[in-house]
Amino acid sequence: MAIPSIAAVMPAATDSGGVSAKAALAQQFETVRLLSPALTGGLSAEDQVVQSMPDASPSKWHLAHTTWFFEQFVLGPHAPGYAVFHPQFAYLFNSYYENVGARHARPRRGMLTRPGLDHVHAYRAHVDAAMAGFIQAARPEQLADLVPLIELGLHHEQQHQELLLTDLLHALSCNPLNPAYRPRPAAPAAVAAATEWLAYDGGVHEIGHDGNGFAFDHEGPRHQALLRPFRLRSRPVSNGEWLAFMADDGYRRATLWLSDGWARAQAEDWQAPLYWQRDSDGWAAMGLSGLQPIDEAAPVCHVSFYEAEAFARWAGKRLPSEQEWELAARDLPVAGNTLGTGLLRPVAASEAGGDAPQQMFGDVWEWTQSAYGPYPGYRAPEGAVGEYNGKFMCNQMVLRGGSCVTPDGHLRASYRNFFYPHQRWQFTGLRLAEDA
C-alpha cells in the first residue's frame, strides 16, 4: 500500500481568509485524517487493541484520541449544534489534559476491548463529517481565527501517526513469531559514507522558529544563542560502528556511562540496541518488516540517550547541542527518508553529501546533549492547549531531525522532539560533534 504524502498540502491553508484558503484547509484536513486509517490497513482488530508496555498505546486508541482532539477543542466549543458522538469518549480518549477532566489511566489503554474497532471508525467518520461541514460553513473571519488550532490538531495527528507505528513495532517485537507489519521494500544499494567533519563558526546565532508557517509553541520565541566553533559529523552513526562499540565492551565499561544510564543498563541488561537479537548467523533486528539481518551501513536505531552518550564518550567525541544541530540544518532542504518513502527503516545515504551534512531529516531522530526546557521568554498558551508541551519541560532530552516513520510535511529545522533519556522504542539514533 502506498503511503500518501501531505508535503504539498500542509502549507496552503493559511494563504488567506478567502474561499481558496477554505478549500485548502479542507483538503489538508482530509489528507492527514485519511493517512491514519491507511496506516492500520491490513492490521487485525487484535493487532490494534494490544498494549505492550505503559509507554505505548494501542493503534485503536491512537485512532480515537486524534479524533477526540477535534471534537474536544474545535467542534465542541465552536460548532453550534454539534452532537457529541458518545459522552464517555471524552473520558476514554483524553491523554493528559488535566483542564479537560478525568481520563482512563494510560497503562490500561490495552484493556479497552470496547468500544470495538468498528465503533472507533464510526467515531472518526462522525467527527470528520462534522469538521468538513464546519469548515465549509464557517465565516472567513471565524475560520481564520481557528486555522492555528486546526493545524495544531493535524500536526498532533501526525505525531500520533508516527507513534502508532513505533508502538506497533514494540507490540510485534513481543510476539515470538516476529511478524511483519509490511513486506520489506528494497532500498537503493549504499555503503556508509566515509566520515567527514564539517566546521561551523561560533558567534551569536538566531535559534528557534522564524514565524513563517506552522510551529509548535515550544519552538519559540526565536532568540539569540552564543555558540563556540564546532564540527559536526557528516552522517549519523552506523550499525557497523555500533557493533565496534559493542565488541570493545561498550556495554560493560562503567567509565563510559552516566551514573543513571549505567544503573538502567545494568537493571535492564542492555547488551545491544533495542530489538537486536543474536543467533549463530550474527545479529539481526526486529523491524516493521519482521526480523532482518543488521545492515551495517544503515544508521543505528532504537538507542537511548544514555547509550548515545556512552558511544560518544567511547568515540572521544560528544553529542551536539540542539542549537548546533539547528544551525547545521537550517539551510538544508527538509527532505529525506521519511514515511512517504515507504521504506519504514533507516537506510544508508545513497551518495556522498559534499560539504553539507547528510540525513539530517528522516532515517533516525538524533539525540542531542540538550535538556528539554523553555526558550528565553517562553510562555505556555492559555487553557488546556497550553498543556501540550510546556508541562513536560523536565527530565527529558531533545532530539532533532525526524525518522523513517515521521509523516511527510511534518518537519522543520526548528522542530524539537523530546523523550526521557532511558527510552529506546522510538526510532532514535545519534550524530557526533566535537569542539573546533
Image (spheres, helix red, strand yellow):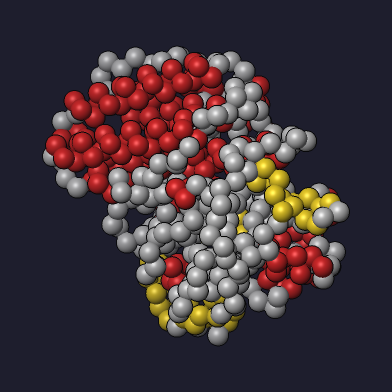
In the rendered structure, the answer to whether residue 391 lies left or right of residue 276 reads left
Residue 181 location, quadrant = top right
Residue positioned 45% across, 75% down in the render: 356
Horizontal relation, residue 254 to residue 8: left or right: right
| Front residue of 225 and 252 | 252
* Residue at 40% in and 32% down: 34
* 43 in relation to 199, above or below: above
Outermost residue to the left? 18
Foreground residue among 204 and 23: 23
Depicted 138 relative to depicted 341: above or below: above
Q: Is residue 357 left or right of residue 138?
A: right
Classify residue 30 by image quadrant: top left
In the displayed structure, 58 sits above or below 203; it is: above
Q: What residue do we see at 13% from left, 39% from top? A: 18
Q: Is residue 42 in view from this perspective?
A: yes
Quadrant of res 355: bottom left
Q: Is residue 264 visible?
A: no
Q: Where does the image place residue 287, in percent across and percent down from the top left?
A: 65, 46
Residue 336 percent location from the top left of the image: 46, 59
* Number of marks in the rendered image: 0
The x and y percentages for residue 177 are 75, 35
Along the line of sight, the residue nearer the viewer: 51 or 223 = 51
Residue 296 pos. (x, y %): 68, 63
Q: Quadrant of the C terminus?
A: bottom right
Q: Residue at x 60, y 77 (%)?
A: 195
